[in-house]
Each structure stands twice: as C-alpha cells, then as structure tokens.
Amino acid sequence: MVSTTDSVSPSSPSSPPPPSQSPSPVVVVSPCAACKILRRRCADKCVLAPYFPPTEPLKFTIAHRVFGASNIIKFLQDLPESQRADAVSSMVYEANARLRDPVYGCAGAICQLQKQVNDLQAQLAKAQAEILNMKCQQTNLLALICMEMAHDHDESPPSNTSSQSVSPEHPNRGVSNNACFIDDNNLGGSLWEPLWT
C-alpha cells in the first residue's frame, strides 16, 4: 500500500518566515490646556492652543477665573496674530494682580511703583543738594585759606641778609664799615693827641 502523503525528510531546508512588520508609531495629539480644562475637543485651528500649551494649565486657569473663556476667545479673535501673544501675557498679569488685590488689581501695583519712584526721586534730589552744599563749602574754605596766606605774606618784614648774615668762620664780617671807621678815629685820636700838645 502506497501512502499518498508526502514525507518530509528532516534534512530538507525549511521555508524562511515572512518578515515581521514593525507597527507604525501612533501620534497622540494632546489638547491644549484651555480645551482640557474646558473639557472639549481641541480643534486643529484652536485659537487658544498657541498661547495655552498643555504644559501650562495654571496660566489658563488664572485667566479663565477672571476674564472667562468666551471673553478670552473674543479678545484674541479681534486682534491680529502678531499681537495675540502680548495680549495673553497682559491678561494673565492682570488676572494675577486681580487675584492678589481684588479691589485695585493692576492699578494698586502701579500706584505702589509710582510711590517708590517718587520716593527715590526725592532721595536723589536731597543727595544732589548735599553734594552741591559740600562743594560750596570746599570752595569757600579754599578761598579763606588763600586769603590768610596772602595776608601773612604781606605782614612779614623784609629780611636783610647782607647785614645779618655772619659766617661761622669769620665772625667779624657782620659788623658794618662805619663802625670800623668810628673805632679807627677814636683810636687815632687817643694816639696822636700828645703830639699836638
């Protein structure tokens, strides 16, 4: 009896397995912080997505608490795209100030800063006045010293060095010539007097 089944020898090469295909990566687009907090689907052209990324949920929470989502969207839609980033920064700053000071908000911070500027300007003016006063005192002091030196110079007597200077080697050089003539006359009179008598 002949078997109809084909016998496969163990030495026969097996067919290679089909190549495994790696699964394509799945791109998960997370909604922006605004849509995530509002629990709505984030559209492709969401006006809030460029300014409220998913990593900064507190930024939208603060602005939403003060202005509201509908007002924020309306503000951004009324502005050109070049000014929207600055507008969002201003709204977040205003919201932070309003939460810290519900009565005055940014106006309170501006008034406080203006008061500090006025105080610093007053201190600067006072310092400049003190510097000017010190310069005037220094100028007056120098003028007084110069006047006293000139007055002392005018009152000092002129020095006669020719009659008062005496050399230590020749102590008789300080004597005037008139004194020498007087001494010679006196001496001569006493010597020649007996000859005339």
Image: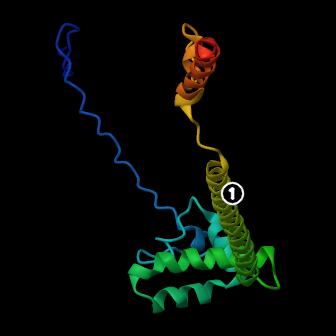
Q: Residue at x 52, y 29 (%)?
A: 162
Q: Nearer the viewer, residue 109 or 54?
A: 109
Task: Locate residue 160: give its quadrant.
Answer: top right
x and y, in percent, of residue 47 in the image: 47, 80
x and y, in percent, of residue 13 in the image: 17, 14
Task: Estimate how packed mark 1 is, as few (under 14), some (14 to 19) or many (20 or more) residues with alpha carbons within 10 Å.
Answer: few
Vertical position of residue 108 compared to residue 27: above or below = below
Task: Locate residue 80: give its quadrant.
Answer: bottom left
Kind of residue indicated by mark 1: Leu
Q: Residue at x 70, y 66 (%)?
A: 133
Quadrant the C terminus occupies: top right
Q: Residue at x 50, y 77 (%)?
A: 86
Vertical position of residue 67 compared to residue 28: above or below = below
Q: Residue at x 55, y 24 (%)?
A: 181
**Secondary-structure class at tag 1:** helix
Residue 140 in sight from this viewpoint: yes
Residue 38 in sight from this viewpoint: no
Q: Left of 97 or right of it: where is 38?
A: left
